[in-house]
Image (cartoon, rainbow, N blue to C red):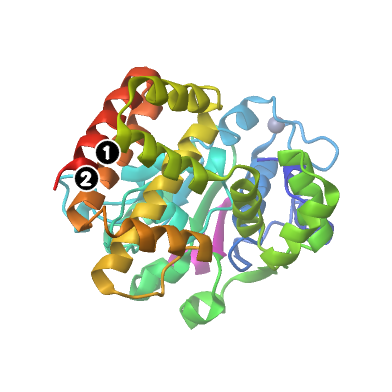
């Protein structure tokens, strides 16, 4: 990550850069910013800057051997720690961030501004509560006590130390008496949930909300939308760039219309109509296709939750609520579960570059059978 990829926040960048340039990097820092305020991207840009061998124009160069690795989040001297859940057959107590590193790198590449629920969804956490456990803390101490591999500096970026709970005390010694050239960067959203003993030992770097104009400029660049519209989205987002991106994405393509037309086509199961629908989605780029299926997953999960709990407290827009109410006559909970599983598989298959047309044709027929089945 480059500093220049982060919208605005010039004074924070300036003071971080100055500390590095003057060789006065604090041993332990707490980057504190609410969800979507850019604290994690800032920590990533900062870590790349610290490791870079050819810093230029107040940023990392992006081409030196350290940058090549740090920008891909694979630098052996930049360690990551973050809340996780159980992984596969491993016991929870044996599971650490390292088990999720590929997923972590994946999400950092696409959305370093993600929030906790984006992350948990990304690792299929289901209802498991995430945390940062004892083994993780012990591993961190071990890693930071080793010699560095490829650069002079060792860095730990810990995202959401709120999830350390009392294990945090294990890290105190490390924070208090760090080994030489070891820098600890904690990236937190909620100061109240961090152990006081840790807080008092870290230098605080406050990450302010994005200004509306910073968000709107960013949206214009990223999505090519009109400045006025971008500003409207920014106004809705309350300084949270992740929220702004979600709004912009959903406004640009009406996924709910697409989803309804898919179900309609599936119900009829007319080959010509199915092909026509598939043609439409085939013309979208891969990210958009994924967004569509992610949207479908989101919709049906909320739909199922609403059906099972009878709660109106679900994350659906009023238009989607209307659609959900109408669907209830046709799609019961077990049918919804089948559709959710199918969509989930589709997302995995898209990631595996499987032939989309063939996959969608058979998925559509399966959904059709399911819908017509009494
Ligand atoms: Zn560099």
Q: Say whether residue 183 is magenta.
A: yes
In this view of the protein, which residue sits in the foreground, 135 or 178? 135
In this view of the protein, which residue sits in the foreground, 295 or 320? 320
Is residue 239 visible in the rendered structure shown here?
A: no
- Magenta stretch bounds: 172-187
* Residue 120 x %, y %: 38, 55
Give the quarter the ligand 1 occupies: top right
Res 262 quadrant in image: top left
Please tell me whether residue 267 is drawn above or below residue 278 in the rendered image.
below
Q: Say whether residue 184 is magenta.
A: yes
Label 1 close to label 2 by CB (< 8 Å) = yes
Q: Residues within 10 Å of mark 1 (few under 14, many from 20)?
A: some
Please tell me whether residue 112 is drawn above or below residue 133 in the rendered image.
above
* Residue 62 x %, y %: 70, 30
* Residue 285 x %, y %: 56, 27
Res 63 quadrant in image: top right
SS at badge 1: helix
Which residue is denoted by mark 2 in the rendering? 338
Instruction: Check residue 342 in the rendering and tell me which mark sits there, or answer none.
Output: 1
* Residue 122 x %, y %: 40, 47
Between the residue at mark 1 and the residue at mark 2, the CA separation in whole angstroms equals 6 Å
Labels in figure, total? 2
In this view of the protein, which residue sits in the foreground, 137 or 308? 308
């Amino acid at each position: 990550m480059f500093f220049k990829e982060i919208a605005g926040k010039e004074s924070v960048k300036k003071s971080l850069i100055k500390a590095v340039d003057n060789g006065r990097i604090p041993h332990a820092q707490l980057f504190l910013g609410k969800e979507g305020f850019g604290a994690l991207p800032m920590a990533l840009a900062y870590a790349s800057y610290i490791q870079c061998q050819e810093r230029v124009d107040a940023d990392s160069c992006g081409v030196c051997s350290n940058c090549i690795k740090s920008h891909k989040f694979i630098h052996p001297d930049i360690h990551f720690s973050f809340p996780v859940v159980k992984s596969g057959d491993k016991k929870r107590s044996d599971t650490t961030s390292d088990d999720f590193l590929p997923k972590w790198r994946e999400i950092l590449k696409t959305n370093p501004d993600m929030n906790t629920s984006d992350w948990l969804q990304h690792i299929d956490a289901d209802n498991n509560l995430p945390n940062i456990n004892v083994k993780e803390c012990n591993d961190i101490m071990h890693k930071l006590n080793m010699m560095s591999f490829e650069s002079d500096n060792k860095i730990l970026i810990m995202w959401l130390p709120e999830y350390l709970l009392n294990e945090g005390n294990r890290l105190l010694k490390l924070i208090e008496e760090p080994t030489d050239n070891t820098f600890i960067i904690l990236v937190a959203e909620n100061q109240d949930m961090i152990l006081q003993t840790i807080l008092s030992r870290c230098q605080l770097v406050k990450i302010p909300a994005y200004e509306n104009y910073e968000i709107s400029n960013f949206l214009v660049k990223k999505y090519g939308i009109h400045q006025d519209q971008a500003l409207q989205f920014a106004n809705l987002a309350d300084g949270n760039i992740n929220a702004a991106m979600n709004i912009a994405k959903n406004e640009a393509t009406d996924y709910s219309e697409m989803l309804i037309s898919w179900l309609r086509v599936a119900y009829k199961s007319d080959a010509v109509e199915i092909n026509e629908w598939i043609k439409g989605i085939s013309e979208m780029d891969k990210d958009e296709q994924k967004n569509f299926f992610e949207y479908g997953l989101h919709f049906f999960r909320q739909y199922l939750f609403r059906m099972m709990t009878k709660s109106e407290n679900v994350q659906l827009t009023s238009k989607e609520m209307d659609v959900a109410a109408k669907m209830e006559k046709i799609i019961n909970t077990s049918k919804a579960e089948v559709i959710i599983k199918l969509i989930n598989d589709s997302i995995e298959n898209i990631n595996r570059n499987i032939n989309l047309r063939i996959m969608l044709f058979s998925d559509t027929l399966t959904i059709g059978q399911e819908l017509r089945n009494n």
